[in-house]
Image (tube, grey):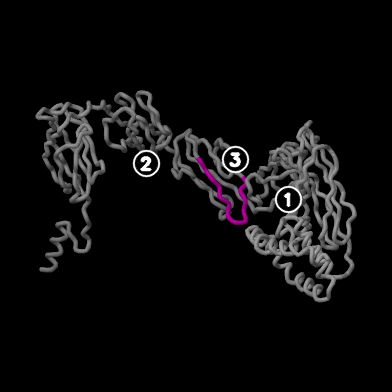
Amino acid sequence: MGLLLALCLIAGGVMPGYVTAQPDIPHYFSGSVSFDGDPVEEGTLVKAFVADVEAAWTTMDDQSRYALEVPGTAGAQVTFEVGDVPANETATWQSGKVQELNLTIDEAPGPPVPRYALTMAADPAVGGNATDETGRSPYAAGAEVSIKAVANEGCSFVGWTANITVTFADETAAETTFTMPAQAVAVTAHFEVAYDLTMAADPVGSGAAIDVGAEGAYAAGATVSIRAEPAAGYGFINWTANTTVTFDDETAEETSFTMPAQAVTVTAHFGVAYNLAMAADPVAGGDAIDVAGKGAYAAGATVRIRAVANPGYAFGNWTGDPTVTFGSVTTAETTFTMPDQAVTVTAHFEQVSPSPGVPTVTTLAATSISSYSGTVHMSYTVGNFSPVEVRFACKRLTDPAWFYSTWVPRTADGNYTEVLTGLVSQTQYQCKAQLKYNSTVIEGDMYQFTTVVGSGTALNDLLGYFGCFIATAAYGSPTAEQIDVLREFRDVVLLRSTVGSRLVALYYRLSPPLAEFIVGHEVVRTPVRELLVDPIVWLVEATGDIWRN
């Protein structure tokens, strides 16, 4: 008996544990529509809303009747509009129900909006299918209609046409839209025989060759987008094909080609990657740029490079170490072929004479260099911009941050000098002159100097360290007036007593790490200056008459 029951259940299409929910079936409404007892005009728009969301629409036929298939949710309220006028009747949505519902309205509907039929076709018919995805034909003029082409096996979609002029969003895309004209229109999806595309990488495991569109087959003449992705330690070299194809750029990792009238295999070639270093000569002359930003390329790869000159400089030529083959050694943007070893490519720049009337600034050699100070110099011209402002930017060779002197206005051509104090003995410094006009800052060449060996006392070097870094950390300049006040108090009061000297020495043993931290964290600088250093400076200045005497 149990076996017989099971067989009956199977025969009847029911199997315990395998019963699946059936999808909801639209609720079918139909009936007449009237206003004040009179039938509503043919072509009047009728809309159905489920839970206040538009779900379906149609137009009145020549018998003043409507018919709607309304998708929805069980138990939801269905309301209607006739010519944008709410109907008096409502209903409760039920899956699969067929309901005769005559609609009435209490005011005259607006005039019917002209609507035009859309016909979809495929060419050839065996090539695939063309569908109206919006599915609401006829349409009012100006409506946006979604359409879709699906190619049959062995065929490929080519493009869309219409029997009259319409505006396709993309006439070559299988899924697109167009704007309905003010007349009936026939839209055709065109198909052609598709040829297989095979993607390969050489050598295997060195990377991936990708068909970006992922179609796998294309009609002759179609544009095919491809991309090469090197594996770790490899670089892309170029594209080849087993039959003649036209690549947009056979040396670019992402490119395209025109599909031939036959199957084709496209291969991405990779090789072991070697490092590329870019350099500028002089450093102040400009930038040498690896355009793709890869930093490493396979031997034989085409590498794109670009030189960008700074103001006051012009690009001269390229050189490579070891020697490489440039597309043009004198063109700012060019290419070269990567050798089978690491290479450094240098962009050489030359100083050019400034345009007439434009200010100039030149960094001159430093003088009076001692263990803890030095005098820096510049020459400048104001051109047609008076006044201008000048200052110096300096730093230790090993430091990332610059410290600056104060901007000083100048109204005529001349020289400017600044004495840097609080330096560290036997240390290399870099210095450059700066000039500002109309918010534009120009710089002179970098000048480098080295302070001489100190007196041998560790305290003096610590004092020099203080002059350079506490000033930079708190005020951004070693020449700030507040620092001069503290230095004077240190020299006049603290260092003239045994206890004071010991306190200073202890402070300089403990403070450098804190000073370095402040230099590296801009957000800390303001609180340190305003809450710690400024109050101390104020107190020292306020009692100046006492300790100076």
Q: In this view, does 150 lie to the left or right of 239?
A: left
Q: Where is residue 200 in the image (x, y as percent from the top left)?
A: 53, 48
The quadrant where residue 509 appears: bottom right
Whole-number angstrom distance, CA of label 3 to CA of label 2: 30 Å
Q: Where is residue 95 in the image (x, y as percent from the top left)?
A: 17, 48
- Highlighted range, magenta: 225-237
Q: Which residue is drawn at 73% across and 71% down?
A: 510
Nearer-N-terminus badge (1/2) = 2
**Disc 3 versus disc 2: nearer the observer:** 3
Whole-number angstrom distance, CA of label 1 to CA of label 3: 23 Å
Q: Residue at x 61, y 48 (%)?
A: 236
The quadrant where residue 532 appears: bottom right
* Disc 3 secondary structure class: loop
Residue 234 magenta: yes
Q: Residues within 10 Å of mark 3 (few under 14, many from 20)?
A: some
* Disc 1 secondary structure class: strand
Q: Which amino acid does label 2 sit on?
A: Glu
Q: Mark 2 points at which residue?
A: 153
Q: Mark 1 points at which residue?
A: 343
Q: Examine the rendered structure and indicate whether residue 100 appears above or below residue 229.
A: above
Q: In this view, does 326 lie to the left or right of 375?
A: left
Q: Where is residue 41 in the image (x, y as percent from the top left)?
A: 17, 26
Q: Is residue 268 left or right of residue 176?
A: right
Q: How crowded is mark 1: few (under 14 residues within 10 Å), some or many (20 or more)?
A: many
Q: Report the predominant secondary structure element of the magenta stretch.
A: strand
Q: Residue 250 shows which numbered tag?
A: 3
Q: In which quarter of the image is the C terminus?
A: bottom right
Whole-number angstrom distance, CA of label 1 to CA of label 2: 50 Å
